[in-house]
Image (cartoon, coloured by chain):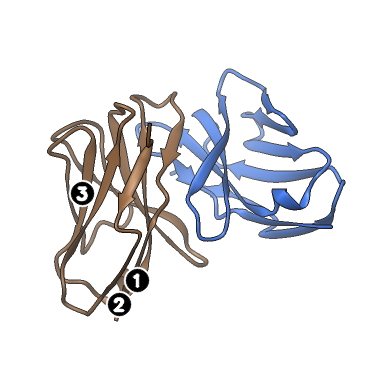
Amino acid sequence: KQEVTQIPAALSVPEGENLVLNCSFTDSAIYNLQWFRQDPGKGLTSLLLIQSSQREQTSGRLNASLDKSSGRSTLYIAASQPGDSATYLCAAHSGNTPLVFGKGTRLSVIA
Amino acid sequence: NAGVTQTPKFRVLKTGQSMTLLCAQDMNHEYMYWYRQDPGMGLRLIHYSVGEGTTAKGEVPDGYNVSRLKKQNFLLGLESAAPSQTSVYFCATKRSNQYNEQFFGPGTRLTVL
């Protein structure tokens, strides 16, 4: 059974800092991994989707990497801004089961 | 193009009452999902559907029923609401298969007194 873990649960950084959010999964036979952002009281917004055949995906200041052999994905945020403050969730898709979500990392970017 | 919409946005029920949450999508997606999100528990899958007329149980299906009579709509029903069903409910959709991106609705905040 796939399990997804995100550590740390919360992170606070000063504005302008580059940062990395971590996601680990137990079953390396994944089809893809998706990163989401959730603002307080809102739904989830898809940020990046990495297929199993890909090593990374980029969108603006965001870069997500995937290492299936080690069961890890990272989300890199460059030059963080207060507007980046949110909860970031990763989710893995493997087998015939729906997405399995981590519990998220709550990011605070301090001005 | 509204994407994924959920009705209602907020609702307060008394224990034992029933209600139906509606998820509607205009993206012609085959797969639809219902999740609940609770503090410390993360997102948990309730039920899902891989196409019109199909439904399947997720991780926490007890106390809920679903129907997918039309491709664009996925209904979540609570027949006899309990305080343990107080939560934020999210609907999500995906185009067709495991390689596609999943999209979420804005959520419904339900309180059961």
Rendered image: mark on residue A98? none
Of badges 2 and 3, nearer the viewer stands 3
Identify the subunit bearing mark 1. Answer: B
Rendered image: mark on residue B86? 1
Q: Residue at x 40, y 46 (%)?
A: B105
Q: Quadrant of the N terminus of chain B?
A: top left
The residue lying toward the viewer, choosing from B107 and B79, is: B107
**Residue B71 shown left or right of residue A1 in the figure:** left
Q: Quadrant of the C terminus of chain B?
A: bottom left
Q: Of callouts 2 and 3, which one flags the residue occurring earlier in the amino acid sequence?
A: 3
Query: In this rendering, does residue A29 appear at all?
Result: no
Q: Colour of chain B?
A: brown
Q: Which residue is mark 3?
A: B75
Q: Colour of chain A?
A: blue
Q: Which residue is mark 2?
A: B83
**Residue A41 shown left or right of residue A10 in the figure:** left
Identify the subunit bearing mark 3. Answer: B
**Which kind of residue does numbered mark 1 sit on?**
Thr
Query: In this rendering, does residue A74 appear at all?
Result: yes
**Which kind of residue does numbered mark 2 sit on?**
Pro
